[in-house]
Amino acid sequence: MALRGQKSTLVITQFLFGIIMCLFLVIISLSSGTAAELQRFQHAAKEDGSLSVLVVGDWGRRGFYNQTEVALRMGIVGEELDIDFVISTGDNFYENGLTGVDDPAFQESFSNIYTAPSLQKQWYSVLGNHDYRGDVEAQLSPVLRKLDSKWLCLRSFIVDTEIAEFFFVDTTPFVDKYFKEKEGHVYDWSGIQPREAYLSNLLKDVDSALKNSNAKWKIVVGHHTMQSAGQHGNTKEIVTQLLPILKENNVDFYINGHDHCLQHISSLDSPIQFLTSGGGSKAWRGDVSWWNPKEMKLYYDGQGFMTAKITQSQVEIVFYDVFGNVLHKWATSKQLYSIA
Ligand SMILES: [Zn+2]
């Protein structure tokens, strides 16, 4: 009897130990977070293999501050270029994002503004710091996509066009000051906690997606500036954490908004071109710092937008002002077949 009692005690002890170990492992995996693949969208290029995109940022002001005029010009240029999709670099709705999926600002600042036929293409949008001051989940919600099918906003994702791959990165949670000096603003961080795990997983996801990419052109899109002579200047957190990954993986372009200007910086220490398209509505005239003229290809402190025409061998970018004037045109080419 005594022996059987000892045996059953041993079995129960082993059983309890097993349960405790399982719980321990579950807690460990939940707290550290696990990297997952970024959501991927396929968007075919045209039959001739080319792709044209239009990029606008920092726009949602119910048509004010020339938002309507920029939208009209986008429609005309979009028609001429037969654009395949639109990229929004964030700060989609001022001042404080959307209050919910039923916020009329969605119609007043988006659907009722970008009405030109050429703009009724898919929009791929990231969130800006102003969007994080509202109900973030609303902008990400499929409800908005039902209200207006051209809308698509996610935190971080990939658009694969085969010749070019676009890596959209959620940059706002990197910036310390939004957590430390909130200046009276309320941010919706509900989807990014715990922050450190969110950021380290995001960096891992971007790094592995870039490493696995066979695309001829690799283009990263985020809201915040990496290299900028504008009001906000460089965003140090993404310069130290994200830029090394872009350099290591031969990214061709980093495209952003945040500074309300149009800007092209061709830095001397990396082949990456830094492109700011943040002129969708209110612009900051004269708000510019000195920058090395060898790197600064364009700084325009007014409203406008950017386009990119991409083929296997060439990318041509063009910046337009609100009147449709070409402010800057720049092209780069690669061999049709890489030697590597
Ligand atoms: Zn911003």
Image: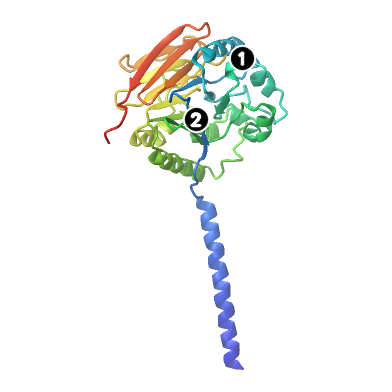
* Quadrant showing the C terminus: top left
User: Residue 236 or 337: which is nearer the viewer?
Assistant: 337
User: Residue 151 or 109: which is nearer the viewer?
Assistant: 151
Tell me the distance, in whole angstroms, between the alpha carbons under discs 2 and 1.
22 Å
User: Residue 36 or 334: which is nearer the viewer?
Assistant: 334
Q: As shown in the figure, which amino acid type bears the numbered disc 2? A: Ala
Q: Residue at image x 38%, y 34%? A: 246
| Residue 293 occupies quadrant | top left
Where in the figure is residue 23, as x and y percent of width and height? Answer: 56, 63
Q: As shown in the figure, which amino acid type bears the numbered disc 1? A: Ala
* Quadrant showing the N terminus: bottom right
In the image, residue 200 above or below residue 313: below
Residue under circle 1?
Answer: 116
* Left or right of 100, for residue 325: left
Nearer to us of marks 2 and 1 is 2
Residue under circle 2?
Answer: 44
Q: For mark 2, give the secondary structure.
A: loop
Q: For mark 1, give the secondary structure.
A: loop
Residue that protrudes farthest toward the left in the picture: 339
Q: Residue at image x 63%, y 12%? A: 64
In the image, residue 27 above or below residue 236: below
